[in-house]
Image (tube, rainbow, N blue to C red):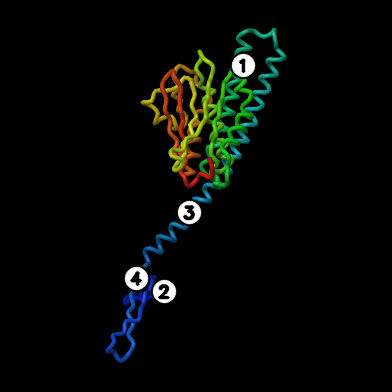
Amino acid sequence: YEFLRKDGSVFESELSAIIATPEDAEKKQNLAVIFDVTERNNALRELKRKNIELERLNEELDTFASVASHDLQEPLRKIRKFAEIAEEELGGSASGDGLYALQVMREAAGRMQKLVADLLDYSKTANALLERERVDLGGVVCQVLDDLCVPIEESGASVTVEALPAVQADPGQMRQLFQNLIENAIRYRHPERRPEVHICAVRHGGRGAAVVTIRDNGSGFSQERAAEIFLPFRRLSSGVEAKGSGLGLTICNRIASRHGWEIEALGEAGRGACFSIQIPERDLTGC
C-alpha cells in the first residue's frame, strides 16, 4: 500500500489488521498497524538492479574470455606449427643454437596456450551455472585416467583407485576437478622415483560427510605454505622446475567452493602431497 503523509510525501507500507472488539462493545472494532517499508523496498529494488547488472557483467566476461581465448590461441598455434616446420626443414643444417631457439619458442608457445586455456577454464568455473545431477565419481576418475593415459604411461605412474561415492554435482566440473588433481600429482613427481597416486574415499561410521583423498609420492611442498597452494599462479613444489599455468589447483578450489565443499592440502617437501575433498552428507547419493 501507499499512504500520504501530512507533508504530502508518499511512503510504501505494509498493513496488518485484526478484529479486536471487546465483549462489552456495541460496535466492532479493528486494530491496524501500518509499517513504513519504503527503505526496505528501495533496498530490494537496488539489490535486484545490481543482480541484473552483475548477470550482464558475467555474460560480458564470458564472452570476452571466449573471444580472447580464440584470438590468442590462433597465433600461438601458428607459432608452434611454424617452429615445428622450421625444425623439420632445417634438420642437421641448423646450428645447435638455432635449433635450441626454435625449441624454446615452440615450448614457450605451448605454455602460453596452456595458460590461456586455464584462464578460460577459470572464468567458466567462476561464472557458469552449476547443473547438478547424480555423478559417479568412480566413473569420472576412470574417464580422466583414460584421457591422461599418455602422461601416465610416459611417467610410468601407478594409479590405484578404491571405491568412490556417487554425488550430486556438476559432471563437467567433477571431471575437471579430478583431472587437475591427478595431473598435478603426475606433473610434480619426484625425479628419483616412480610416481604413485592413490585415490580413495572414507565415510566415518557409514554416515555423515565423505572425504575423498588423492595422495601421491611426488616432490611435495612445505606444509607451512599450504595456505598459498590454492592461490593463482603459485607453485610450491620444492626442487621441481616450474610447470603448468599455476591455475590448476585454484580451479579445483573454486569448484569445491561453488559446490559448498572444502578442499585441503597436506604436504611434506620431498615426500609427497595429499589433497582431501570433504563432501557433506546432503550431496552423497551412494558409496
Which mark sits nearer the N-terminus, 1 or 3? 3
| Residue topped by disc 1 | 103
Tag 4 secondary structure = strand
Which mark sits nearer the N-terminus, 4 or 2? 2
Q: Quadrant of residue 156?
A: top right
Tag 1 secondary structure = helix
- Dot in front, 2 or 1: 2
| Residue topped by disc 4 | 35
Callouts 4 and 2 close, C-beta under 8 Å: no
Amino acid at dot 1: Gln
Please name whichever residue, 47 or 130, is drawn nearer the observer in this view of the structure: 130
Q: Which mark is residue 51?
A: 3
Q: Which residue is the extreme one toward the bottom?
A: 26
Which mark sits nearer the N-terminus, 3 or 2? 2
The residue under the point 31% across, 84% down is: 21
Please name whichever residue, 36 or 75, is drawn nearer the observer in this view of the structure: 36
Q: Quadrant of residue 98?
A: top right
The residue under the point 35% across, 78% down is: 18
Amino acid at dot 3: Asn
Q: Residues within 10 Å of mark 3 (few under 14, many from 20)?
A: few
Q: Residues within 10 Å of mark 4 (few under 14, many from 20)?
A: few
Amino acid at dot 2: Tyr
Amino acid at dot 4: Phe
| Residue topped by disc 2 | 1
- Dot in front, 4 or 1: 4
